[in-house]
Image: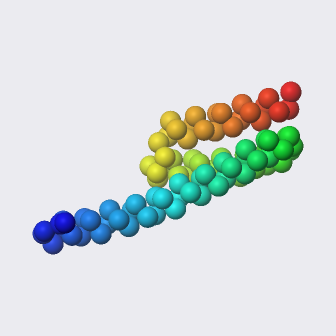
Amino acid sequence: MANSKQARKRARQAEGRRVLKASQRAMVRTYVKRVIKAINGGDHATAMTEFQKAQPIIDRIADKDVLSKKKAARLKSRLNKRIKALAA
């Protein structure tokens, strides 16, 4: 346990950040699941619209350092690749 006043404050701040980032990560997962569900359903138009909704969310969360920028790019690339395969 934190012994100094400063350490207690840092622990409180860290906990607040942890809760916020967990919520943001869950939101990204939800949007990704919607895209995957549309892909598995075989509907290209729906998958594309869901992907277009998910893209700015993923980018925003990556800018906030909740996800790394490389992981966000990899995620978008893989989803886009699956959508393109669906169209073919």
Q: Is residue 37 above or below residue 81?
A: below
Number of labelled discs?
0
Q: Quadrant of the N terminus?
A: bottom left
Residue at (86, 27) in percent of width and height: 88
Question: At which x and y percent is residue 81?
Answer: 72, 31
Q: Is residue 78 above or below residue 67?
A: above
Q: Is residue 3 above or below residue 36?
A: below
Question: At which x and y percent is residue 78?
Answer: 65, 33
Question: At which x and y percent is residue 85?
Answer: 79, 29
Left or right: where does residue 2 sit relative to residue 49?
left
Residue at (78, 31) in percent of width and height: 84
Q: Quadrant of residue 7?
A: bottom left
Q: How is the image coloured?
A: rainbow
Residue at (56, 57) in percent of width and height: 26
**Would residue 52 be visible to someone looking at this image?**
no
Question: At which x and y percent is residue 62?
Answer: 51, 47
**Would residue 70 be visible to someone looking at this image?**
yes
Residue at (44, 49) in percent of width and height: 65
Q: Name the residue at the front extreme.
A: 1
Q: Name the residue at the left extreme.
A: 4
Left or right: where does residue 82 sit relative to residue 78?
right
- The front one of 16 and 60 is 16
